[in-house]
Image (spheres, rainbow, N blue to C red):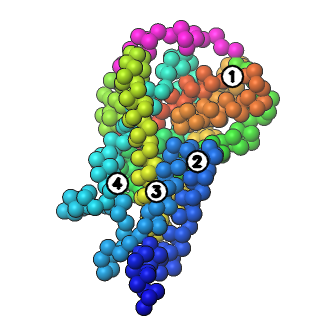
Amino acid sequence: MFIIKILDLFQGFHTLFLQGPTIAISRILLIFLGFLLVYLGAKHILEPLIMIPMGFGMAAVNAGVLILSANNYGNLFIAPMTQDADLMHVMQVNFLQPIYNLTFSNGLIACLVFMGIGVICDIGMVLSHPFIGMFIAMFAELGTVATYPIARLLGLTTGQSAAVSVIGGADGPMVLFTSLTLAPEYFVPITIVAYLYLSLTYGGYPFLLRLLIPKNLRGMVIISKNKKVSNIASKDKLIFAVVINTILCLLFPVAAPLFLSFFIGIAVRESGLEKYIRLIEDIFLYGATFFLGLVLGTLCDAQTFRDPVVVKLLLLGMLALLISGIGGIIGGYLVYFLTGKKFNPVVGIAGVSCVPTTAKVAQKEVSKVNKMSFVMEYALSANICGVITTAILTGIYISLLSK
């Protein structure tokens, strides 16, 4: 009797015994996975801005399961599938529910992150090397395109297949936006898979580069004859941002919020609006990134991963990023041959648009071989072009499949 009363008091332990062995083991494993994510984030092995809040959220939500009613268990963090009738009650009880409903379910958090990415991107890199950047970026979308038919063959719906395929673009906000639109029933696992795997690009892509590109090519120095980024006027960058934003919104209105967010960030940067730059970068970008990681972590309860479809999503997400990385390297090799072997093919990996992670990976791998070789300018051009091509493909998927 005393033990039962103790368990009634400490309900996190009590529910471990009430939910069955499968859920109990899953909860324990996810708690330790949360610990691991915090550790890897703190060590900067994975992206700390996402992984530390995600790890804490994952550990807390799987530890903090309580008895809500006679046959109902849950937590006081988030109820992602809440119906309208329950919304007011849940928003008063679950402390992260307002953030989820007001920023996640409508895609706002994706737009805030995208706006921040625009502020930190120098579009001059694209204007200095437009054709190389866009050429590589198109090849780096190979995973975004090739994963779709594979997902369909595995039994996923058109919307689910498109959402998991966008992981190949290595752009978290795009995945979030697509999954909310085309596969809301699997928005949680698809977005979690995307952000977990995007952090793994730090560790995985260097091995892919070493496997597919010989050492002598990795250390190649690129002799640039293009106009230097520093010589490109801010007005030219601003004109480019306004014109391209308008054209892309005309072509793909369903992705217009993403295009607007990204290019207005660029416009603020190039206009020198320091107050807006600080607002968007310090508050919007980092605030949205923090809550993105925290909310995704709290969505990682054991029930989420019971669906066998989630296993397919895990495998397809990894496959999409692998194929995109290979596609980017193929693009780098093609530029290498088209320029008369005067280009470093390592830049190809930067076409996978995880800004600026893949560009840093490219430069780091080059520097290990030759400290005098600097490819960052070309890598960032491919990186930013990758953001644009991923947004275009997102628009194409949503336009074709949302009806």
Question: In terms of secondary structure, where does tag 3 sit?
Answer: helix
Note whether 23 is above or below 52 in the view shown: below
Q: Residue at x 43, y 32 (%)?
A: 282
Instruction: Identify the amino acid type marked 1.
Output: Phe
Q: Quarter of the image holding residue 261?
A: top left
- Our reading of the magenta stretch's main secondary structure is helix
Residue that carries the numbered disc 2 in the rendered image: 41
Let me know if residue 324 appears in the view.
Answer: yes
Note whether 35 is above or below 244 in the view shown: below
Q: Using the image, tell me which numbered label, if any, was put on residue 57.
A: 3
Sequence-earlier tag: 4 or 1: 4
The mark lying in front, picked from 3 and 1, is: 3
Crowd tier of the residue under label 3, counting other residues whose Cα lies within 10 Å: few below 14, some 14–19, many 20 or above: many
Instruction: Identify the amino acid type marked 4.
Output: Leu
Expressed as whole percent of the image width and height from the top left, the position of residue 247 reads 35, 24
- View extreme (right): residue: 216
Mark 4–mark 1 Cα distance, whole angstroms, equals: 44 Å
Q: What segment is highlighted magenta in the picture?
A: 223-243
Mark 4–mark 3 Cα distance, whole angstroms, equals: 11 Å
